[in-house]
Every structure is written in C-alpha cells, then in structure tokens.
Image: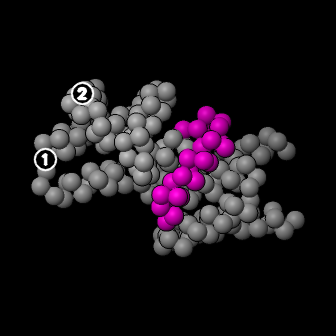
Amino acid sequence: MPKQKGIFILLLISLGLVVLFLLLPKQPASVREKANNPIDKDSLKLMQAVELVNGSNPMEGIMMLREIIAEDENNVEAQYWLGVFSVRSGQLDKAVERFNKVIEIRPDYIAAFIDLGGMYVEMDSTEKGLAYFHKGIEIDSTNNYALLFSAQAEEQLGLLEDARMHYKQLLRHNTDTVVVKRVNEFINRIETTLNR
C-alpha cells in the first residue's frame, strides 16, 4: 500500500506539472507588457537573452542576463530568469538565491514564490513548499498556479479539507473545460476519501 501511495503522489505531481506547463505564459506578464509598449534598451536585451537561452545559444543568453544584472542588480526580470534557468540546469542553490533576491526586490512577485514552492516540493520539503504556495495565494487569491499547487501539496500532506477548498477556489477562477474536468475529479477523489 505505501508503494501505491508513492506512485499516486508522483502521478498527481506529474499531472499538476503538465497542467502548469499548459497554463503558463511563455514570458512573465511584465515582459509581455513591455513588449506591447515602446521597447527600452534593457527590455529588448532581456527579451533577446531569454530567446537565446530558450533557443539557439543558451550561454550567450545567460551572459546577456548576467550583464543586465551587472548594470543593475535589482533588475527583477533578469534575476527571475536567471533563477528559472538555474532550475533547468539543476543548480538549485543558485535558483533559490535568485528567487529570494527577486522576492527581496519585489515582495509581490508571485512567480518567484510559486517556483520556490515547486523546488521545495521536488526536494521532498512539501511543507516548506506549501508555505510558499500559500504566500502566492496571499498575493493573489485567484492565481491558478498558487491554488493548484497548494491543493496538491495539501493533498500530499493529508490536509484534505484544505486541498478541497483550494481546488474549489481554483474552479471559481478557471473556465478551461479540461482543467475544470480534471480538478472536479480531484475534488471527487478527496470527497470519497473523506466520506469513508
């Protein structure tokens, strides 16, 4: 039975990550907003760096991001993206530093809290990860990622009432039929467990 529970938890986390990647915008909102406005030199350089890392020349993109930080260590977007790319390359200690720097600069930067929470869950520190997801909900109680990951972590920790509450809250702010169907399945599973 414990082995089945472990497999179930891994499947649940995997499904959550799939949903997250489907819902995630390709760039943070602030980068997209700047892209719609006249582009300043720093914003253009940031967009180019992110494109390079995601595309043909990752190291050149990383170097550009580091140059931006060298000029302005409080550039939130460059710090954030260096954190994201640190996670991708498995440099979790550097990612934690970057995300914490982002939070220091902008305490309402929800993506940094969600990414930190996800890292801690992956490192088997689900309670610590949950605290970061909850902080994301405090910042924006309608954020799909904060709600989904909070619910998943709570379910993993056996906090089923809390998980059900956050799944239901997620439904109130989501109209995607695939997501709604899947989240309802999560809620039904929890309710079945609670009614045993």
Q: Nearer the viewer, residue 42 or 193?
A: 42
Residue at the right extreme?
196
Dominant secondary-structure state across the stretch colored magenta: helix
Q: Is residue 124 magenta?
A: yes
Instruction: Pinpoint residue 1: horizontal percent, then vertical percent.
Output: 85, 44
Residue depicted at x 28% and y 39%? 75
Residue depicted at x 53% and y 58%? 137
Which amino acid, by three-letter code, is at mark 2? Ala
Above or below, 147 relative to 11: below
Which amino acid, by three-letter code, is at mark 1? Asp
Q: Secondary structure at mark 1?
A: loop
In the image: residue 138, left or right of residue 154:
left
Q: Which residues are magenta?
A: 119-145
Q: Secondary structure at mark 2?
A: helix
Instruction: Pinpoint residue 138: horizontal percent, then vertical percent.
Output: 52, 58
Residue receiving disc 2: 70
Residue depicted at x 62% and y 63%? 166
Residue 172 makes an appearance in the image: yes
Residue depicted at x 30% and y 37%? 74
Residue receiving disc 1: 40
Q: Which mark is residue 147?
A: none
Q: CA distance from mark 1 to mark 2?
A: 18 Å
Q: Nearer the viewer, residue 26 or 172?
A: 172
In the image: residue 76, left or right of residue 122:
left
Instruction: Pinpoint residue 97: horizontal percent, then vertical percent.
Output: 44, 31
Give the number of the mark in front: 1 or 2: 2
In the image: residue 81, left or right of residue 116:
left
Instruction: Pinpoint residue 91: horizontal percent, then vertical percent.
Output: 46, 26
